[in-house]
Each structure stands twice: as structure tokens, then as C-alpha cells.
């Protein structure tokens, strides 16, 4: 039990509530007891950390890309963090015994521009992957001059390559080379567009998974 010395204005010794009174070199002082910290290793917290680590491993190799792809959602955070937040909420599943990334649900860009129409990919010899898409006339705010942004993610190596500012929406196709070290690897393919006039981007479309051919 604590006590107050010399009346209400006197020094406090011992503990009163969450206040501890003491004296040092004749000077009375008070300090507040630190609040107890919740266990940082609850199941919910551990699960969130696992999800974060999974998504960060996906987003980190494409950090420069998602800073552009998620720039419209970089409000009080970076585009990189916006990409992580979105994909934790929408692209993480659980298959016993671990969390897994649902690649078709993942986005590498997010915006209001018209999305890619039926994107697909095909792998060709020589480490070439070709994207193809349709271009319906007058679809939403799409323009023939929108720039195609293509990204390939290597699941096993956790690496990516991407290309932009080459093909337009009207071209309907874009080929991209990948490293020879990717031969035989499974890669996930994403296609989005950026407006040439105002820089608005579209949601990325999942264009499938292909195996790189030597």
C-alpha cells in the first residue's frame, strides 16, 4: 500500500493505483506503471504475420511495378503497401497445412481504366512468352492508345520481369523475353493497361500460367 506524506501536497511513497511514488536525493517524484502488453503471439497475430510474409514475398520483386499499378490507392501509404494490403485481403487462401497465394485473384495493378478483355498467354521456344487479348470497340473508357503493361512472376524463384510502353491496346499482342534460368519454371502472367492521356491504370487481368520453354 502506498501513502501520502505531509498531507495532500506531500510526496507519495509506494504504490497508489497505477502510480508509484519514490524519492531521489530528497526530490519526490511519481511514475506511471507501464501497461501490460497483449501477447504478441496470439493465433490471430501469427496468422496475420504468415499472410503478410506470403504476400510480401510476391509483391517485393515487383515493387517498382506496383508503385505505378497501385498509385491511385497510395493514400497515406505507398503503392507497395497498398498492393500488400489488397492482396492479403483478396488473394490469400488456406490449404492444409499452410496459407497459399491464389494467383488468379491477385492484382499487380488496380484502377478504373477498362480492364483487359480475355487475356491469355502462350510460351514459345527461346524463353518467349506472348500475351494476347481482345479489344472490344467502345468498351468503357478504353482507348486504342492505352499502353499494355505485362508482368510475369516466377513462383519458384520469386522473381519477376515486366514490360510496358511498347504495345498498345489496339495491337492485341505483346511478346516478352524471360531469363534463360527460368527454363522449365511455371510462371504467372498478368496484363493491365495505362491511359496514354492521364496515366490512369486498369485492374490487372490474370492471363494464366505457362511453363517457360528453352
Image (cartoon, rainbow, N blue to C red):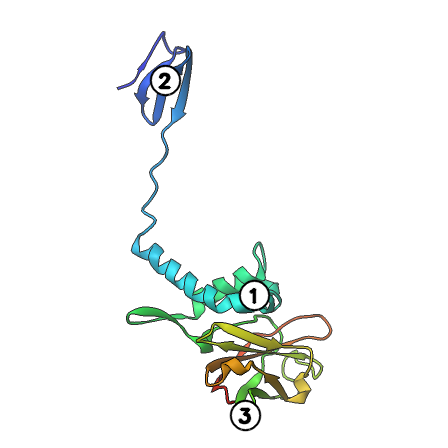
| Quarter of the figure with residue 110 | bottom right
In the image, 102: left or right of 172? left
Q: Earlier in the sequence, mark 1 or mark 2?
A: 2
Q: Is residue 69 above or below residue 190?
A: above
Q: Position of residue 43 (x, y in %)?
A: 30, 56
- Mark 3, mark 1: which one is toward the viewer? 3
- Quick one: SS at disc 2? strand
Q: Position of residue 46 (x, y in %)?
A: 34, 57
Residue at x 49%, y 77% (from the top left corner): 154
Residue at x 54%, y 92% (from the top left corner): 125
Q: Is residue 211 above or below residue 74?
A: below
Residue at x 29%, y 18% (from the top left corner): 2
Q: Residue 125 shows which numbered tag?
A: 3
Q: Quadrant of the N terminus?
A: top left
- Quick one: SS at disc 1? helix
Task: Evaluate if marks 3 and 1 touch, with contact meaning CB atoms under 8 Å apart.
Answer: no
In the image, 178: left or right of 91? right
* Depth order, front residue of 21/127: 127
Q: Residue 63 shows which numbered tag?
A: 1
Q: Residue furthest left?
A: 1
Whether residue 206 is visible here, answered yes or no, is no
| Quarter of the figure with residue 152 | bottom right
Q: Which residue is mark 2?
A: 22
Q: Is residue 65 above or below residue 133?
A: above
Mark 3 vs mark 1, CA separation in Å:
29 Å
Q: Residue furthest front?
A: 181
Mark 2 vs mark 3, CA separation in Å:
79 Å
Amino acid at each position: 500500500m502506498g501513502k501520502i506524506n505531509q498531507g495532500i501536497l506531500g510526496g507519495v511513497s509506494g504504490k497508489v493505483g497505477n502510480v508509484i511514488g519514490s524519492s531521489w536525493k530528497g526530490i519526490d517524484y511519481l511514475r506511471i506503471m507501464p501497461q501490460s502488453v497483449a501477447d504478441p503471439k496470439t493465433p490471430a497475430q501469427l496468422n496475420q504475420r504468415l499472410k503478410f510474409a506470403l504476400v510480401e514475398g510476391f509483391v517485393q520483386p515487383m515493387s517498382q511495378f506496383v508503385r505505378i499499378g497501385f498509385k491511385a490507392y497510395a493514400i497515406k501509404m505507398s503503392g507497395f503497401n497498398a498492393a500488400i494490403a489488397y492482396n492479403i485481403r483478396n488473394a490469400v487462401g488456406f490449404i492444409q497445412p499452410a496459407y497459399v497465394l491464389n494467383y488468379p485473384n491477385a492484382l499487380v495493378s488496380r484502377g478504373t481504366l477498362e480492364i483487359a478483355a480475355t487475356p491469355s498467354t502462350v510460351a514459345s521456344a527461346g524463353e518467349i512468352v506472348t500475351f494476347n487479348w481482345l479489344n472490344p470497340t467502345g468498351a468503357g473508357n478504353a482507348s486504342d492508345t492505352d499502353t499494355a503493361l505485362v508482368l510475369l512472376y516466377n513462383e519458384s524463384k520469386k522473381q519477376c520481369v515486366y514490360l510496358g510502353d511498347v504495345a498498345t491496346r489496339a495491337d492485341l499482342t505483346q511478346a516478352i523475353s524471360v531469363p534463360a534460368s527460368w527454363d522449365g519454371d511455371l510462371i504467372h502472367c498478368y496484363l493491365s493497361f495505362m491511359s496514354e492521356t492521364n496515366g490512369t491504370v486498369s485492374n490487372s487481368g490474370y492471363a494464366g500460367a505457362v511453363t517457360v520453354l528453352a
